[in-house]
Amino acid sequence: MTIWKVIVLAVIQGLAELLPVSSSAHVVVAEKLMGLDPSSPEMTLLLVMLHTGTMFAVLAYFWKTWKKVYFSSRDAFRRFAILVVWATLLTGVVGEILKKIIEKTLFRGAAKAEIELLFSHLELIAPALAAAGLLILVAGLAEKRKQEAAAAGKQKLRTGEGTLTLKQAGWMGLVQGLALPFRGFSRSGSTISTGMLAGSAKEPAERFSFALAVVLTPPVVILEALRLVHAAHAASAAGTPIDLHAALVTSLLGAVFSFVAGLLALKWLSSWLESGKWHWFGVYCLIASGVAFYLHARGF
């Protein structure tokens, strides 16, 4: 893969990952348009390394806020840790159940069933985008109605201070599990929207959603790195070796570019959250879903 392709994918990932529009769907579409195989071990490793770059962007952007809210005292950190562990546990349970169901249905009889094989199917990505779009749209319109009611003096609008309840964090963790196998079902969009629909103000939901991403990214990176190593061994035995060094260098380069793009995207995301335009991300996902269906019909 050429350097310019890596840069293009990194910028797409960095800009889309931290916006609630599913970076994976955008990267998969870009890969297909470039003639690449999104389900290959090299490309899935590149994808998770791009996620790693945006994870560091999240750390850089949110650190001061997290320090103030989550690390201000021992009790605050203890409560935050409980919420993260609880949500991540539910994510793992839902993700594993979905993985088993998919392996027993879509991959029934397949010699090598890997969830990553779904990543190149636009006919699955398109409805996932639509589902995320509808969820974001509903949450955004509900939030807009609350803001209008607060402006009219009918109710008090919740502020962005504080943290989530155990119930709200649990719902966010459950929905995050749905995003693991289905590219297109935006992780950030679905979790933030779920938190909002569960009664949280949007700013705490945003902070917690990206904190969950930081916890989730390292194990995913490890799993994909192991998958690439295993694939390299199998390819070597078959006489078609994979250049591990080139794949790793390419992935690290992509992580750097996605880090920079991710910082820019986070600034935009926060401004849109604060200005009450969340529902427009849902509209965008619905449009993107139509584009994905169109590309699938055209043979991509």
Image (cartoon, helix red, strand yellow):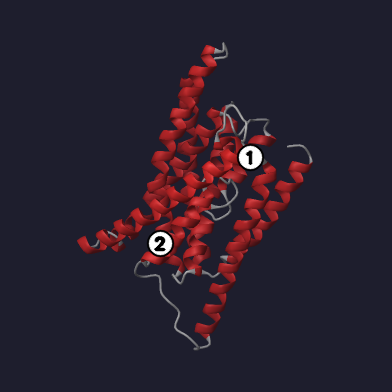
The structure residue drawn at horizontal position 55% and vertical position 37%, both measured from the top left corner, is: 115
Q: Identify whether 151 is placed above or below 160.
A: below
The structure residue drawn at horizontal position 44% and vertical position 83%, both measured from the top left corner, is: 156
Q: CA distance from mark 1 to mark 2?
A: 31 Å
Residue at the far right in the pictured view: 298
Find residue 106 and name its label: 1
The residue pinned by badge 2 equals: 169
Q: Nearer the viewer, residue 139 or 105?
A: 105
Neighbour class for label 1 at 10 Å: few (<14), some, many (≥20)?
few
Residue 138 seen anywhere in this rendered image of the structure? yes
Q: Looking at the picture, which amino acid does disc 1 mark? A: Leu
For residue 110, which quarter of the picture? top right
Find residue 120 and name its label: none
**Residue 116: image location, x then y, percent:** 56, 36
Residue at the far left in the pictured view: 74
Q: Looking at the picture, which amino acid does disc 2 mark? A: Ala
Q: How many marks?
A: 2
For residue 81, which quarter of the picture? bottom left
Side of 1 where 206 appears, left or right: left
Question: SS for tag 1?
Answer: loop
**Residue 173: image location, x then y, percent:** 44, 56
Residue 271 seen anywhere in this rendered image of the structure? no
The structure residue drawn at horizontal position 40% and vertical position 59%, both measured from the top left corner, is: 208
Q: Nearer the viewer, residue 189 or 96?
A: 96
**Residue 159: image location, x then y, percent:** 41, 74
Q: Quadrant of the N terminus?
A: top right
| Of marks 1 and 2, the one in the foreground | 1
**Residue 27: image location, x then y, percent:** 60, 41
Question: SS for tag 2?
Answer: helix
The structure residue drawn at horizontal position 56% and vertical position 13%, both measured from the top left corner, is: 238
